Amino acid sequence: MKLKQYIFDYLRKKQPERTVRFPHLDQSLKVMVIYESDPLERNDAIKAIRQDLLRRQMDVTMWGYLGRKEIQTLILPQSRILGLGDYNWLGKPKDYVLTDLKAEHYDLLIDLSTQTLLPLRYLAMYTDADFKVGLSMGEGLHDMLMGMENPDVKGLYDQIINYLTTIKSND
């Protein structure tokens, strides 16, 4: 097992128990979306997803990751793309990233990662959210797991929203 993965697994197991609450999408929710940025940092699918969530009257924060040191996109309060410089050599976010991430509580985390990237796994793990949903990657980070062959970001998002609107909770 690789050292980086071993340390991630160790830290994941040390995370405190969370209280899980299923989100009601018909209510105004505070949502965190994490994703892998495209190399040009255009993220057209992500922008469309943001617009859909805003149309649903949700308070949306979006954090992406791109495996480069230099990131061109501006850091905004509701949107940012993190790069290699925002993580230490083990792949864990630096303290200032964790401080910003843990400063907010979210009703819902939507993880649009379509492949296992340790920096995004850390974001999913450290995000303070009542309910976490994402692609099944065998780590136990999410409360609801999606299974898809050859997933793409838009298809994953559509499936997540479909399930979240279909399932009714007794909360």
Image: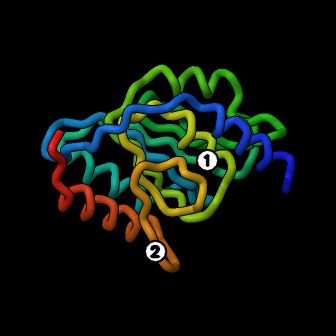
Q: Which three-letter amino acid code belongs to the residue tagged 1?
A: Arg
Q: Is residue 171 among what the camera can see?
A: yes
**For the C terminus, which image quadrant?**
top left
The residue under the point 39% across, 26% down is 105
Q: Which residue corresponds to mark 2? A: 148
Q: Where residue 73 sits in the image (x, y, percent)?
A: 56, 42
Q: Choose top left, top right, bottom left or bottom right for residue 96.
A: top right
Taking depth in this image into account, of 28 and 136 the one nearest to the observer is 136
Taking depth in this image into account, of 88 and 2 the one nearest to the observer is 2
Q: Which residue corresponds to mark 1? A: 121
Q: Choose top left, top right, bottom left or bottom right for residue 18.
A: top left
Q: Where residue 36 sits in the image (x, y, percent)?
A: 57, 55
Secondary structure of residue under mark 1 = helix
* Mark 2 nearby-residue class (10 Å; few <14, some 14–19, many ≥20): few
Identify the colour scheme used: rainbow
What is the distance, in whole Å, between disc 1 and disc 2 at their CAs?
18 Å
Going by the picture, which residue comes out furthest to the bottom? Answer: 149
Q: Is residue 130 left or right of residue 14?
A: left
Q: Where residue 31 sits in the image (x, y, percent)?
A: 34, 39
**For the N terminus, which image quadrant?**
bottom right
* Mark 1 nearby-residue class (10 Å; few <14, some 14–19, many ≥20): many
Q: Looking at the image, is 50 positioned above or below residue 78? A: below
Q: Which three-letter amino acid code belongs to the residue tagged 2?
A: Met
- State how many labels appear: 2
Q: Looking at the image, is 163 positioned above or below residue 133? A: below
The residue under the point 42% across, 24% down is 104
Q: Choose top left, top right, bottom left or bottom right for residue 157.
A: bottom left
The reply to whether discs 1 and 2 touch (Cβ–Cβ < 8 Å) is: no
Work out whether mark 1 precedes mark 2 in sequence or the reverse, and give the earlier one: 1
Q: Is residue 125 left or right of residue 171?
A: right
Secondary structure of residue under mark 2 = loop
The residue under the point 73% across, 49% down is 68
